[in-house]
Image (cartoon, coloured by chain):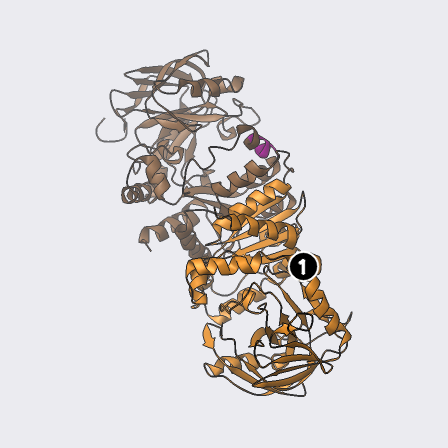
Chain colours: A brown, B orange
Amino acid sequence: MDDRIAEHAAVLVDWSARIEEGDNVVVSVAEGAHDLAVAVARALGERGANPVMTYGSSEIDRAYLRAHDGDFDDDPAHELALYENADVILSLGGGRNTSALADVPGETRRAAAKASEEVRDARRSTDRISTVHPTRSLAQQAGTSYEAYQDFVYDAVLRDWESLAEEMARMKDLLNDGTEVRIVTRDTDITMSIEDRTAVNSTASVADDSHNLPSGEVFTAPHATDGEIRVDIPMTLRGKRVRDVSLKFEGGEVVDYDAAQNPEVIAEILDTDDGARRLGELGIGMNRGIDRPTDSILFDEKMAGTVHLALGRAYDACLPEGKDGNDSAVHVDLITDMSEDSRLEIDGDVVQRNGVFRWEDEL
Amino acid sequence: MDDRIAEHAAVLVDWSARIEEGDNVVVSVAEGAHDLAVAVARALGERGANPVMTYGSSEIDRAYLRAHDGDFDDDPAHELALYENADVILSLGGGRNTSALADVPGETRRAAAKASEEVRDARRSTDRISTVHPTRSLAQQAGTSYEAYQDFVYDAVLRDWESLAEEMARMKDLLNDGTEVRIVTRDTDITMSIEDRTAVNSTASVADDSHNLPSGEVFTAPHATDGEIRVDIPMTLRGKRVRDVSLKFEGGEVVDYDAAQNPEVIAEILDTDDGARRLGELGIGMNRGIDRPTDSILFDEKMAGTVHLALGRAYDACLPEGKDGNDSAVHVDLITDMSEDSRLEIDGDVVQRNGVFRWEDEL
């Protein structure tokens, strides 16, 4: 077995999930994630944790959902009890076809999601981490070879996380001390307020309330956005390729939009509800192991030299105690390259220029 | 997808597990059983049942067990809660290597088994059914090609179960009305008492307390065994091929034994405990879809024209209410071919001769 699989498992179990002896762990194994699951099982055995392995298959979900009449039972007792009694959930992604759920009606998905709210809450109350094992399907989605994709994934995952967490803490402090962010590129000039907001250092560890491996971003919940932004990292949204989205904000709301490919997807997202027209997140990618977009939000939004803005729901962690942020049924991240002719300002100070942070040599 | 996979799923869900709308089902999916799991998911969706898919991988079990220090936590709460809240467990076997657990120390397995007694009890209190999806590994174990093995499995599983259940009920009645069974072949002449015992009609349905698909046997719990038997269906026991076992009984206990290959495996089994030297089961195979041994007990013991005797533990279902049968940590089935020069007698009446039952034409 590739040594990197065992290293991935060790980072997941120790750095990310902080698993200890006696922890009750649910490991969700995707169709193509068997080898990572073997390595994780070994790591859990060494640490004396107690795994239950579940099988996460989009093909199985599709078969079940399409066959069902849509009147789903709420929160089945066995499923709820499993997660209510779990300390940790490790989701090992890595399927065999990223389009496997393409022909499940949206209505069915929404009905199933609505019937499992308590299960979702129980899952959210665990120390949960999502990661992916490299598969040929994900390599295809990224438009690259399997071997190159494996290298890509391990470069992103096998970081010196402690050192990256320290660097990200600087960015977090700058955001927490500031009141206004301005982003400028060739096609972008946008400002947003971050007053009264708390930035989150997403270190790929439950110790920092971070639930993705890899991670490597600092994010907050902006408001009162004004100006225009060009989203130049392409991505697949709702099964369709979307390129070069532009958004115009006035008083915190999107007042105009366009896209070079499939603009109707953006229209559909904006029309979800009132909150979908406002921002829920400003994120700053800081993972230098991620050097190119791969059409996977798990990786793309953490790419060093990018920022992302999410339309929709804000995370509570960024809001003052007891205060609600932007609410919406959606949270759609849109990513902009900052590596050329770009700058990120906080209260008029340039914090990053052409993808390089103030504390790095070149600035 | 092969139509027979969907038929297999339908037999499993409807005839075997009697699944109804709202049932909470755990589906355990072996490494090679994905396609059957897709078909089962579709069937469960159609019937409005609620599945949780678990992943049953010997490679994962091996990695976990070998890495663990052996001091296992008793009955982890999340695992116990899952099964305590399940109505049905469908175990879809079909791995990729029948020897995957060969290098897990016996001591570790026993410690793990001992730490999960409540989990096992919770599983036993569900309507549980075990079946297998044909895999190349199982074809190899059977010494045949993949395609031939697929035909074999579906011949065994896709029976007219109602009609077979009726035929088996005849055999059950004969055993319940009788007091002594005698089995005679070229190398066998053995008698055992079945007085005060209840025969079980193993119809592959939880409705008859039968938990294997395929099934197709009638069994009881004999005692006071005397005589000699030659076990001529070869099988792999504890990872070793065992051929032509002979056992000599006096007063219900094995007093002598031999085997043409690996007799030490039989010695080891007999030395487990006192109960391992006595019989726990007499079973009569009646599934005519199973026409050859495949070195898999799930199929072999149900083969029409065979009987099997199990050393060790008896099933409570065969005993009078409140009375205990033979107790042992083991239950090892040993199968004898009855298709030639053989007869099965109950109280002196020939019930089966050369593999053909009294109610069939040829007798």
- The percent coordinates of residue B356 (x first, y second) are 63, 73
Q: Is residue B59 left or right of residue A110?
A: left
Q: Which residues are magenta?
A: A110-115
User: Mark 1, residues whose alpha carbon is within 10 Å: few (<14), some, or many (≥20)?
Assistant: few
User: Is the residue A251 above or below the residue A269 in the image?
Assistant: above
- The percent coordinates of residue B183 (x first, y second) are 64, 81
- The percent coordinates of residue A335 (x first, y second) are 36, 25
- The percent coordinates of residue B174 (x first, y second) are 74, 73
Label the magenta part by its dominant secondary structure: helix
Q: Which quadrant holds the C terminus of chain B? A: bottom right
When asked about the image quadrant of residue B315, the answer is bottom right
Q: Is residue A112 magenta?
A: yes
User: Is the residue B33 above or below the residue B267 in the image?
Assistant: above
Badge count:
1
Q: Amino acid at mark 1?
A: Ser
Q: Is residue A15 magenta?
A: no
When asked about the image quadrant of residue A307, the answer is top left
* Res. A233 in view: yes
Relative depth, front residue between A116 and A170: A116
Kindly give the residue lying farthest to the left in the view shown: A362
Going 74% across and 81% down the picture, which residue do you hit? B347
* Res. B17 in view: no
**Tag 1 residue:** B163
